[in-house]
Amino acid sequence: MPSGDYLVWIDLEMTGLKPATDAIIEIATVVTDRDLNLIADGPVLAIHQPEEVLARMDDWNRRQHGSSGLLARVRASRTRVGEAQQRTLGFLAPLVTAGSSPMCGNSICQDRRFLARCMPELEGFFHYRNLDVSTLKELARRWAPAVAESFVKQGTHLAHADIHESIRELRHYRARLFAPAWSGSAGA
């Protein structure tokens, strides 16, 4: 039976940052409980894009996604955007009550913009709120710089690894910024 307490983490890799003109090339999802314990890893899908779409990438994206191997996976993939959306929803539906989880991740509003345009059914599966780890990062950078500096990101720019890094980062901030108030589910 789906849970209304689970958190859904999502990450996209894109050809650029403009939802109107760029495309999704990878999607991954992870489900955790409210204490950030892993419930399930979802599908990690490279999404095929035509060469003309890939050719529009800027140098940074071409280098990053080329060196990580993602571009080769995208070119070899037969998965289209619609199929990736349905497979992701098929993973989430038995685990999480639709509309219950905020969209969780780093700079997650950017992912939400791409989902709204390219995968609207998946975007609609989430609550309208976001759980954006980047907000805590920005607050820590301003108000607790030692806490912000003590977390070092790997920055692989591969969706699955980036989600797990976001979860580790949120655990880091929880332990250092909220420790007196947080004691697990019993104290929530």
Image: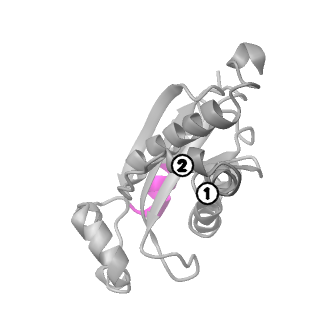
Q: Could one spot residue 75 in this view of the protein?
A: no
Front: mark 1 or 2: 1
Which residue bears the numbered disc 2?
10
The residues colored magenta run: 80-87
- Foreground: 163 or 48? 163
Residue 116 x, y percent position in the rendering? 65, 65
Q: Quadrant of residue 50?
A: bottom left
- The answer to whether the residues at label 1 and label 2 have Cβ atoms under 8 Å apart is yes
From this view, report whether residue 124 is shown above or below residue 80: above
Q: In which quarter of the image is residue 89?
A: top right
What predominant SS class does the magenta segment belong to? helix
| C-alpha distance separating marks 1 and 2 | 8 Å
Whether residue 83 appears in magenta in the rendering, the answer is: yes
- Foreground: 81 or 111? 111
Looking at the rendered image, the quarter that the C terminus falls into is top right
User: Would you call the spot at circle 2 few (<14 residues within 10 Å), some (14-19), or many (20 or more)?
Assistant: many
Report the residue at 64% width, 21% height from top: 1
Which residue bears the numbered disc 1?
108
Whether residue 117 appears in magenta in the rendering, the answer is: no
Q: Could one spot residue 167 in this view of the protein?
A: yes
Q: In terms of secondary structure, where does tag 1 sit?
A: helix
Residue 57 x, y percent position in the rendering? 37, 82
Name the colour scheme.
Answer: one colour
Lateral position of residue 51 relative to residue 184, left or right: left
From this view, report whether residue 188 is shown above or below residue 47: above
Lateral position of residue 153 relative to residue 133, left or right: left
